[in-house]
Image (spheres, grey):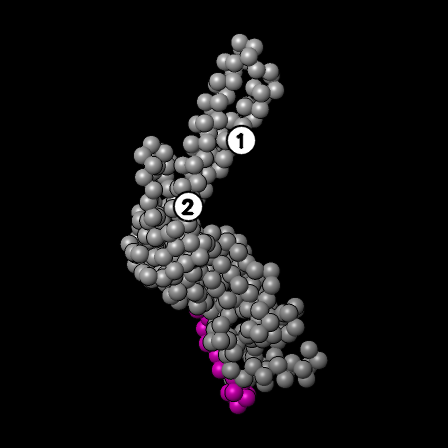
Amino acid sequence: MAQVEVKLSDTQARNIGVRVAHPVSSRTDQTLPYPAQIVIPTPQLWVVSAPVAGMVTNLQVARGDRISAGEQLVTLQSPSFVSQQRDYLHAVAQEVLATQQLKRNADLFEGKAVPQRVLEASQTEARQASIVVAERRQMLRLSGLSDEAISRLTNEAAISATLTVSAPQAASVVDIAVSPGQRLEQSAPLVKLARLSPLWAEIAIPASSIRAIRTGAKVEIEGYAAPGKVVLVSETTDAATQTILVRAEIPNNGELHPGQTAAVRISFVSAGDSAWEIPYGGLVRRGEQTSVFVAIDGGFRLVPVTLLAEDQDHVVVSGPITDKEEVAIGGISALRGILSGLGQ
């Protein structure tokens, strides 16, 4: 857009309500502060469910606890778990019998006392018995029983009615979904766990300012030392607010908490010129083009600028202006009216 001048004396400018201010250098070419919501990344959030139907007899953790891998979470009393152990021991016994029968028939076949089909039938039965044992053992593993506990069950045949559910990895307890005495179906949620580093900062950016923000841009949270980076700039716009979701990943040393709000600034990627902050009312929009009125001797010049960021009070722009110049921040409608009279 070509630069256009409006001729006005100081008295005329005052009479039409023109006010001016000096642009302020924007801090390290960053956006204005935007509100952000701190949330847990969805890949770091999971639910521990009841492996079998039963009744909760004890809770070993509480909301907010930090736990390590293998730490006990919930104790269940379960008839279904008793049945699983019984079925496993029965399968082991059947496998032993099938293996012994196979050995006998193999010896008899060597002595030509039985035909080959009898040996083959014994081999099939032994194979099927082994498969059933593997299946029952896997069911016990899914119920939370360790290989050591399964070996002890095999050797001692000590069936237990209680089952302890443990944490699969180190995490923080986000929520408890059950209470002692509660009866549960299989797969009912017990405890919600999460890893709290890194965290996400979700930011709603006005659609008009999104062009200055790119994936990989540095993100700083006010009052928090460790910077993060933009990992997502959404391709869709919220129809109600005309904002676009920007998601940043932030390392967490314990100072950030999911659910809190914070003010963040996003660095401009490859901002060519210096960035300047001016009051929102000083920006002139003409279609998709943006500009400002810069004071000159005998009037004002309309100077094209690039809009980098905005909120309800201020905008950040880049362009051929400096903090030594004065930019019109009031009487903009009157100046535009004069331009219209000039055919601009």
**With respect to residue 10, does 311 lie above or below?**
above
The stretch drawn in magenta includes residue 19 = yes
Give the x, y percent position of residue 21: 46, 76
Q: Nearer the viewer, residue 285 or 224?
A: 224
Mark 1: which secondary structure?
helix
The part of the chain drawn in magenta is: 11-29
Could you give the CA–CA distance between mark 2 and mark 1, rounded to whole angstroms?
Answer: 21 Å
Q: Based on the displayed image, in which of its 4 quarters is residue 283 positioned?
A: bottom right
For the N terminus, give its image quadrant.
bottom right
The stretch drawn in magenta includes residue 122 = no
Along the polypeptide, which appears first: circle 2 or circle 1? Answer: 2
Mark carried by residue 83: 2
Q: Nearer the viewer, residue 324 or 293?
A: 293
What type is the residue that disc 1 sits on?
Gln
Residue appearing at x 65%, y 80% in the figure: 339
> Is any atom of residue 87 visible in this view?
yes
Give the x, y percent position of residue 82: 38, 46
Residue denoted by label 1: 128
Q: Residue furthest front?
A: 113
> Is any atom of residue 328 visible in this view?
no
Q: Residue furthest right?
A: 343
What type is the residue that disc 2 sits on?
Ser
Residue appearing at x 54%, y 84% in the figure: 331
Q: Nearer the viewer, residue 208 or 57?
A: 57
Mark 2: which secondary structure?
helix
Residues packed near mark 2 inside 10 Å, few (<14), some (14 to 19) or many (20 plus): few
Residue appearing at x 37%, y 37% in the figure: 150
Give the x, y percent position of residue 133: 46, 34
Residues packed near mark 1 inside 10 Å, few (<14), some (14 to 19) or many (20 plus): some
